[in-house]
Amino acid sequence: MKKYNIVICGGGSTYTLPMVKTLLDNTEKFPISNITLFDTDESKQQKIYQAAQVMAAPIGVDIAQSYQLAETFSGADFVFMQIRSGGLEMRELDEKIPLAHDCVGQETCGAGGFAYGMRSVVDVVDIVKAVRGQAPEAWIINYSNPAAIVAEATNRVFPNDRKIINLCDMPIAILDGFAEALGTERQKLTPRYFGLNHFGWFTHLYDEQGNDLLPGIKQRLTEGNMMPEELKEDSDWVKTFEQLSKMATDLKGHIPNTYLQYYLYPEYIVSKSDKNYTRANAVMDNRLQAVQDQCDFIIENNTIEGSGLERGVHGTYIVELATALAMNEKKEFIMIVPNTGIIPNFSYGAMVEVPCVVSKNGAEPIHVGEIDTFYKGLMESQYAYEKLTVDAILNRDYDAALKALTLNRTVVNVDTAKSILDAFNTQMQFNLK
């Protein structure tokens, strides 16, 4: 069997070691010759690289690292993109500037997602150009946030590149929660889903016998009885599932992605937010140190045994997708693809998130059909925001940026949008004109 060369962009990410572990655990099904970690921040990547070397040595997989685009992608078969442009320091501003104006402060939704997108798109486009210059046939699996804006931009800049795959693991994380509640495995469930990234709904959930289990899930949500056991210790996730239960109770119809809480209850979200200590602060204070400690343990003991390192939803889903592409498995995945009639009464060409059948030829979306007025109205407005945001990024256009933020349901007011935009423009030097 062919052995594949993998490049992980964002090698210094806290998600990298679980990703590497997942790859190494699956080499019988998805053989690997080499894994290269790429990051522009040497201080963040170095220990992760050393720990990855310890993990890979017994299996005979080579681990390399790089800090320069020009010398990274030659010979690559797959490029996994998980970059965080600006790092956690910029994420903190993404969250705190909107909160200072009584708007939702979240890294991918609302004004915070807009600011994150202003940085991410530029870097993602540069990386894709570098990949295509060195490895024209490599699959690029992009799950860098904000995925909706990044997907819109890559589709616009590289319209004919069928080997750029955009996706997000959040629907899968939700499905894992559903599977746990049902006492089964996610891989035994077949979801039907539509929307935009972080802005979608589950319509059906079939088991292996074709039974729709979603009505039972909705009943449990309305009873407040759906919190996955493994997430009960994380207060942010507890709040997230509480809001999912509220959404399922308040609005009849499909079960929403958890991220819709930010758009449907923005005032409540702001009222429960700490404007001085956001999720970015929690990650910096806790997760970063935990990953460093884990790396130190692996390096010092020359083993991952006892380190507590586990696979995550994030890595598992990406490796499953890469395997389906390489091995022509024709499995279903929820992905972000152009709307070419998948949802006939929604904007043609918009990047929609829907189930797709994945083979060696890429993603073949499954037809959704027309959607009801409520969902269509929400999605058209959100897509207009995403489209204008990409206009603003690619053209450095202040007017497009202001209109984008005004359209976003977490902002709405023009004066507020202008104040937030001006703060972003000054503090982050976006140079919008």
Image (cartoon, rainbow, N blue to C red):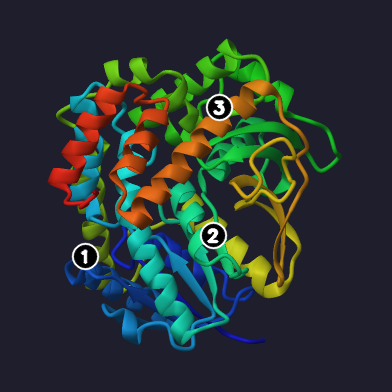
| Residue mark closest to the camera, 2 vs 1 | 2
- Which mark, residue 44? 1
The N terminus appears in which quarter of the rendering? Answer: bottom right
Q: CA distance from mark 1 to mark 3?
A: 39 Å
Q: Is residue 291 left or right of residue 245?
A: left
Q: Is residue 215 left or right of residue 120?
A: right
What residue would you read off at disc 3?
378
Residue occupying the point 21% across, 24% down: 101
Label 2 Cα neighbours within 10 Å, binned few <14 / some 14-19 / many ≥20: many
Q: CA distance from mark 2 to mark 1?
A: 30 Å
- Which mark, residue 236? none
What residue would you read off at disc 2?
155
Q: Position of residue 117 (x, y in %)?
A: 35, 49
In the image, residue 4 sits, relative to residue 280, either above or below, namely below
Nearer to me, 39 or 114: 114
Please tell me in which quadrant of the rendered image residue 95 appears. top left
Label 2 amino acid? Asn
Residue occupying the point 34% across, 25% down: 411
Residue 372 appearing in the image: yes
Label 1 amino acid? Lys
Nearer to me, 60 or 174: 174
Disc 3 on helix, strand or loop? helix
In the rendered structure, which disc, 3 or 2, sits on the residue that comes first in sequence? 2
- Report how many numbered discs are placed on residues in the image: 3
Disc 1 on helix, strand or loop? helix
Label 3 amino acid? Leu
Nearer to me, 165 or 183: 165
